[in-house]
Image: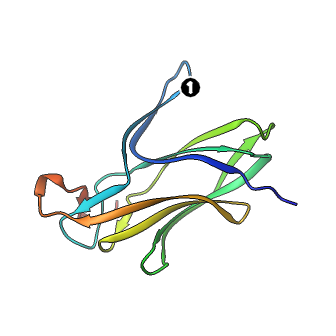
Amino acid sequence: MTVKPVLQALLLADHVYIDANTRKKVIAGTTNHITAREFPSRFGSRKFCFVSLTGVREQIPVKFRYSDLATGETLVELQDIEIESDDPLDTVEMVVQLPRLPLPHPGVFSIEIIAEGEIVGALRLMVSQSQDEDGADWDDESDN
């Protein structure tokens, strides 16, 4: 019987810094709500996911999936990110830089972590329309 990892933390952030000496993570600009003035658009910049898992047995592939919960459509998928641990009691932390995610419309989206073919956890992301030019997180330029 395969035992799936247990998600301890999943954060979306502007940046995750890793201290060179201690290897501790400094998570800056966490969010679960994005605003845009117009749709469709994309995140104004790349974002980072900080993930903490336990129950990892040996080496397993992990997949990140960004989905539109209104339609069920998968908008972005990052596959074959390997995580590894010799001890399932250890905590495995990882930082993944996401591409500039699409914002097709206001609504609720999901960033899911999938291991062993099952969702081990998800982050709900609210996307809303902003009338305030300075308050929008959007960028209508094409992804480079």
Question: Number of marks in the image?
Answer: 1
Horizontally, residue 142 falls left or right of residue 26, namely left
Q: What color scheme is it? A: rainbow
Residue at numbered disc 1: 23
Q: Residue at x 75, y 45 (%)?
A: 55
Q: Residue at x 66, y 39 (%)?
A: 92
Q: Among all residues in the image, which is located at the extreme top?
A: 21
Provide residue 54's location: percent of width, then percent of height: 70, 43
Task: Classify 53 as above or below 65.
Answer: above
Tell me the crowding category of disc 1: few under 14, some 14 to 19, or many 20 or more residues within 10 angstroms, Cα based: few
Q: Amino acid at mark 1?
A: Arg
Provide residue 23's location: percent of width, then percent of height: 56, 26
Task: Classify 13 as above or below 118.
Answer: above
Q: Among all residues in the image, which is located at the extreme bottom?
A: 71
Q: Secondary structure beneath disc 1?
A: loop
Q: Nearer the viewer, residue 3 or 44?
A: 3
Indicate the quadrant containing the C terminus: top left, top right, bottom left or bottom right: bottom left
Provide residue 53's location: percent of width, then percent of height: 65, 45
Indicate the quadrant containing the N terminus: top left, top right, bottom left or bottom right: bottom right
- Please indicate, yes or no, whether residue 142 appears anywhere in the rendered image: no
Provide residue 128's location: percent of width, then percent of height: 26, 66
Q: Residue at x 49, y 24 (%)?
A: 19
Q: Residue at x 55, y 61 (%)?
A: 112
**Image-quadrant location for residue 136:** bottom left
- Please indicate, yes or no, whether residue 107 appears anywhere in the rendered image: yes
Q: Nearer the viewer, residue 76 or 7?
A: 7
Horizontally, residue 130 falls left or right of residue 95, namely left
